[in-house]
Image (tube, rainbow, N blue to C red):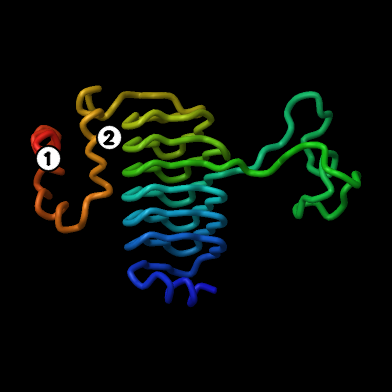
Amino acid sequence: MLEQLRLENPTCIINSSNISHADLGEMVAILDHACLNAVHMGSFSYVECNSILHNVDVGSFTSIGPDARIGLARHPSKTFVSTYPSFYSNQNSSCPLSFRGDKVFDDSVPKTTIGNDVWIGAHVIIPGGVQIGTGAIVAAGSVVVKDIPPYAVVGGNPASIIRFRFSDEEIKVLLESEWWNWSVDTIRRHIDAFSDIKRFKEIATRS
């Protein structure tokens, strides 16, 4: 399976990992013991060691640190007496015995969406269905329970906004530029501007 994936994605680095139903862009890196299921990854993004992603769309140039857990299933927390899956479903592989012959709670994992140029730190937990905006930073060890706007820096349990990386005007310029879709040659030509938001604004508003 991995060999076939490597053949289909010759520009990517795919180490010893558990991967199924993955759609990879160019220059993607998936490092040791990562686990991906039903995942789309944009070009130049990477997943560090021991991270688990399930039903996740990842943009381009996104960095996912080690031991992250993204796209976790739900358990009932209201009205049900027990959160144990055998009491609400006959289709859970974690339970050797089910007390039901049907399924009365939808515990499927809703899609999680992670934008472009996002940095997710080590040991971050993101339940299924959350949206992480482009340019956001999620501090290590955070538990994200609600959507994060573009270019926000968040941290904590539950994660809350600490600050924004740029001003509203600068964020607007960055989002409108869609630089993550630029060609490699264009990025190389303007590489110095990526170290200075003021220079980047000049280039982006000129083009």
Q: Are marks 1 and 2 in contact (CB under 8 Å)?
A: no
Number of marks in picture: 2
The image's mark for residue 175 is 2
Q: Quadrant of the C terminus?
A: top left
The image's mark for residue 34 is none
Amino acid type, callout 1: Ser
Amino acid type, callout 2: Leu
Can you name the residue that lies furthest to the front here?
207
Which residue is tagged 1? 207
Q: Is residue 103 above or below residue 155?
A: below
Spatial CA span between label 1 and label 2: 14 Å
Question: What x and y, as percent, mark residue 98?
Answer: 87, 48
Instruction: Kindly indicate the quadrant of the structure image that contains residue 194.
Output: top left
Question: What x and y, as percent, mark residue 80?
Answer: 81, 29
Residue located 68% across and 44% down the image: 108
Label 1 neighbour load within 10 Å: few <14, some 14-19, many 20+: few
Question: What x and y, as percent, mark residue 71?
Answer: 56, 44
SS of the residue under disc 1: loop
Name the foreground residue: 155 vs 103: 103
* Direction from residue 83 to residue 183 in the image, left or right: left
* Direction from residue 23 to residue 200 in the image, left or right: left
Residue located 20% across and 57% down the image: 184
* Direction from residue 25 to residue 185 in the image, left or right: left
Question: What x and y, as percent, mark residue 76?
Answer: 74, 32
Instruction: Kindly indicate the quadrant of the structure image that contains residue 198.
Output: top left
Label 2 neighbour load within 10 Å: few <14, some 14-19, many 20+: some
- Of badges 1 and 2, nearer the viewer stands 1
Name the foreground residue: 172 vs 140: 172
